[in-house]
Amino acid sequence: MGLLPSFRACLAWALLGLVLGTELSLQESLLLKSLGLSTKPSPKTPVPVPSVLWRIFQKRKMLPSTNKDLGDACRVEEFNVPGNIIRVLTDQGHFIHNGQPPRLLCLQKRLYFNLSALEEGERLTMAQLEIKFSHNSYHPSSRGQVFELRLYQAPQMSLRGMPSQGRAPKLLVERSFAQLRKSLLFNLSGVAKDWRTYSRNLGLILEISVSGGEGASAPTSRGLRSLCASIDSFLDTSLLVVTLSQQQCEASRRRRRSVHHPPVVPSNLCKPRRLYISFSEVGWENWIIAPQGYMANYCLGECPFPLTAELNSTNHAILQTMVHSLDPQGTPQPCCVPVRLSPISILYYDNSDNVVLRHYEDMVVDECGCR
Ligand SMILES: *[C@@H]1O[C@H](CO)[C@@H](O)[C@H](O)[C@H]1NC(C)=O
Ligand SMILES: *[C@@H]1O[C@H](CO)[C@@H](O)[C@H](O)[C@H]1NC(C)=O
Ligand SMILES: *[C@@H]1O[C@H](CO)[C@@H](O)[C@H](O)[C@H]1NC(C)=O
């Protein structure tokens, strides 16, 4: 293509290398690592994307790109907390069947959320438990009976899955509802922070029971069964966790997002060139949910003597072009490289099949310069 060798050297950019198929597996694993993944995820039973993550993803996509920079990159406006990674962890706990359930207890389930997907350096800023039902469970009678929901911190379990002797489960939440809505939310930020620091994560125990209203006669066992039956709409629980990967945020503060796609102006001078990266072309369509691809761009072009201001060069690059013009064999031209990059948000399945919305820095080339 008539490119100078130095230009080709300048193109050693991980994503582009991936597209061109050079040293694919090495590049890929380096890139996955920088995205916080140990290997390429291959979701086995992909869960549906939680609507809250879709909403946030769509909203970010719609924002004018100029609003995306600085503080915004490190804040989740929707929850008003610092963070650049949002995960929805699925529950891996089991129903507890211990023979005859105590009276009035409709549902008893152990909840377990594996937080090991979070990296060491991530600061947890929010954890919200969602308990989902397929429909609202209306109270079938008007006797003032209510559903009671209790959430305990799980104690050490014995082999039979029962709390071991002498360790009472710690009550975290106790609430009464006349009706169970499709979705109940609970703030577990404190508990989840503890799990990451000093206390072991043994999970939670969820109990839903019914209780007779005041002054009401004790519900008959048939009445109880029908009350409990409305809990059959119980679907599942998930834990939404927001974390802040500080490193990335500090990097982003130094940069400002510029704008738009590079203009299509024929020129062989150093400038951004259009490059659309399709995730299916790099074989990532299985685990990246959205976007399907994006305009990543790349830098290409000459850095001739004399360097003009538009080429965003450094003093060093200016001197290097001077030396190059005197001794073309001995000293290469400066490289045409990205000098301003901007972030994008990606929605994907991680190595544990959790759905993650993560803000990634340095994904789009906005400006190039001779360096
Ligand atoms: C949590 O996940 C990690 C890796 O994702 C795994 O090694 C570990 O065994 C899991 N822990 C439990 C209790 O399932
Ligand atoms: C959630 O709980 C933590 C402490 O456990 C508290 O600091 C935080 O403000 C709570 N968040 C909301 C939205 O109430
Ligand atoms: C150099 O930076 C300016 C803005 O600071 C930008 O308009 C221009 O496109 C950049 N040059 C290149 C080659 O990207």
Image: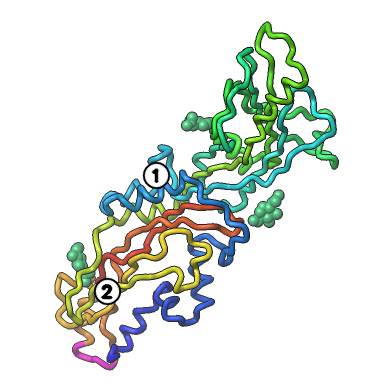
- Residue 326 on the magenta segment: yes
Kindly tell me whether residue 132 is visible in this rendering: no
Quadrant showing the N terminus = bottom left
Q: Position of residue 66 (x, y in %)?
A: 26, 52
Kindly tell me whether residue 336 is visible in this rendering: yes
Tag 2 or tag 1, which sits nearer the N-term?
1
Give the number of the mark in front: 1 or 2. 2
Label 1 near ligand 2 (CB < 8 Å): no
- Name the magenta segment's main secondary structure: loop
Q: Please give the range of residues in magenta.
A: 325-329
Label 2 near ligand 3 (CB < 8 Å): no
User: At x 32% / y 85%, what residue is drawn?
Assistant: 6
Quadrant showing the C terminus = bottom left
Query: Residue lying furthest bottom in this view?
Result: 329
Q: Nearer the viewer, residue 27 or 178?
A: 178
According to the picture, the residue beneath numbered tag 1 turns out to be: 75
In which quadrant of the rendered view does residue 281 lie?
Answer: bottom left
Label at residue 273: 2
User: At x 65% / y 23%, what residue is drawn?
Assistant: 148
For residue 351, above or below residue 142: below
Q: Is residue 360 left or right of residue 337?
A: right
In which quadrant of the rendered view does residue 157 lie?
Answer: top right
Q: Position of residue 114 (x, y in %)?
A: 64, 48
Q: Nearer the viewer, residue 245 or 315?
A: 245
Q: Position of residue 333 (x, y in %)?
A: 26, 83
Q: Which amino acid, by three-letter code, is at mark 1?
A: Arg
For residue 242, above or below residue 316: above
Kindly indicate whether the residue at mark 2 contacts the one at mark 1 (C-beta within 8 angstroms).
Answer: no
